Amino acid sequence: MLKKHLKIKMMLQTFKEKIDHWHFWILGLIFALALTVRLLGVDWGMPHNNLHPDEGIIFVPAYECALNHNFEVHEYYRPNHVSIKLNTLLYVGIQELYFAPQGEMDFALNYSEHFALFTTASRVLMALFSMGVVILAYAIARLWGKNQALFATFLFAVFPSFIEHSHYITPDITLLFFLMGVLWAALCYLRKPSLSWLFWMSFFTALAVCEKYPGAYGCAIIAAVVCIARLKKPVMILRDGLLAIFFLILGILAVSPILLIDFRTVLDVIGGQNRQYHLGADGLNFGQTFLFYAKTAAVHMGLILTISSIYGIVRSIKKKTKEALVLVAFLTYIVPISMLSVHWERYTLPIYAAGLLFGAFGVFYIVEDLQKVLNKKLIVSLVVYFILFLLPAVSLTAGGVAVCGSFLAPDSRILYQEMFAEMNVSSYNTIYDCNTPLDPGGYYGAFNEFVAGDPAQYKYGSSPKYVMTSSSQRDLYLAADPEVYGWIANFYSKLDSDYALVCLCEVENPSSYFWEIQNIWYAARSIYRYMQGAATGYEIRLYQLVP
């Protein structure tokens, strides 16, 4: 019995030593994997310019700044100033280094004719920011241990939502990068309080604010770490607090001074944004929104990582109290974001990050606390390691590959254009939703063309032959509040009940599930269907109104 016990212990020790020996090789492979899955399909949707409704909010102002040789951005909506300015520099660089040497000096013409090149370059920039998130995850988790850092880095590398948003020219990944930068600098400040780390915390916060207003939460992280590090020196808390404010203001002035110069407009925009509504993303109170983000994070992480993250919080507070409290302060981002009037999955990215870090730490704490049992029984050890490490890793990897597949697959809005043209379905005889082959982008619903949303009462003379709908509209209105949107929901219901469905174009979109086995199964199914030629995007329905 003693020999068997020693054999198991030696096997586990040998495995750990091999991981330590190959640490940087494994890390390099993880980084390579992370970059690969972020670049695969980065040119999705080209050459169409409106398949994602939010990308134009960044690339249009960037184009205008590059065209007018003006680096001052007067957009206040998010405000996206870091992304806009970086893309401006990127576009100028492409023009001067690629087109100008060939004698093609007309930037507007080059941009119009090579839109796919400029847009793909912008998405590559987002992918690089996402790589920065993975690198920062390693730097942060390294404070808990080498193996914890490797596991956390892998989770960040293959996490499906991070991969998805890396393919969009939107501020969500850049905001996450800057907030992770604040967290990393805060943990470094905690280990060695200094003005340099205080400056970096403040500067990352300034970048976060200039990119997206919720980035101001970096101030809460700074306040937390300064109070924790200087707990016994109240005067130093005051000094570092004032210096942090000073550095923050300097940072905003350096990046985008217009946000301070026109501060009243910024406040008006922020106030207006929190009063806005958006179909399918509003109507929840604080508690419901908080629950939405908690549930979304749990589903995307899976059962094992959700449990281990909770365990990781408890054990980290006991073993690495100060560092854990700073990371808890980062996780508490869920509170202010739940106060907003709208809720989106993409707002959950910083919550995912905190959950994955605590989840990686929690797995190792569980193994540590079960060490006596694991050293005695090999079968139990294998089962525990499979459940804690392999199962969540395979689940997230499968989901990440499915997301990559969705960006490599054809989009339904583009794929079926030729088919409908052959069926003589066009804008002349069809009323259509946005996000359909007849209108790949846009924001318009077909129901607006009918009296009270009745398909039998066309507003403008004789009835069109067809109505084409998109699940981007149909599904949201059918699930919306009937007191507000009931007449629109009735429009789609009547199409189903009273008119012939001529064509149904189904799609395959990856999704996340709380149970790892279920998640692996559906991810594998999505991958298989993409390999068989399935389309992604929105489900398209064509109804015939008149013979």
Image: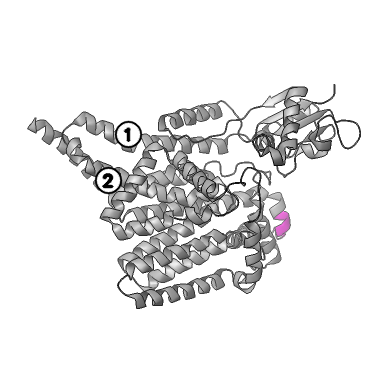
| One can see residue 43 in this view | yes
Where is mark 2, residue-wise?
Answer: 365
Look at the numbered disc 2 and give the secondary structure of its residue: helix
Tell me the tag on residue 387.
1
Give residue 374's quadrant in the image. top left
82 w.r.t. 41: above or below: below
- Left or right: residue 55 versus residue 401 is right
Q: How is the image coloured?
A: one colour
- Left or right: residue 268 versus residue 287 is right
The type of residue carrying mark 1 is Ile
| One can see residue 76 in this view | no
Which contiguous range is marked in magenta?
A: 104-110
Q: Is residue 223 magenta?
A: no
Residue positioned 18% across, 41% down in the render: 13
Look at the numbered disc 1 and give the secondary structure of its residue: helix
Residues packed near mark 1 inside 10 Å, few (<14), some (14 to 19) or many (20 plus): some
Nearest to N terminus: mark 2 or mark 1: 2
515 w.r.t. 149: above or below: above
Q: Is residue 107 magenta?
A: yes
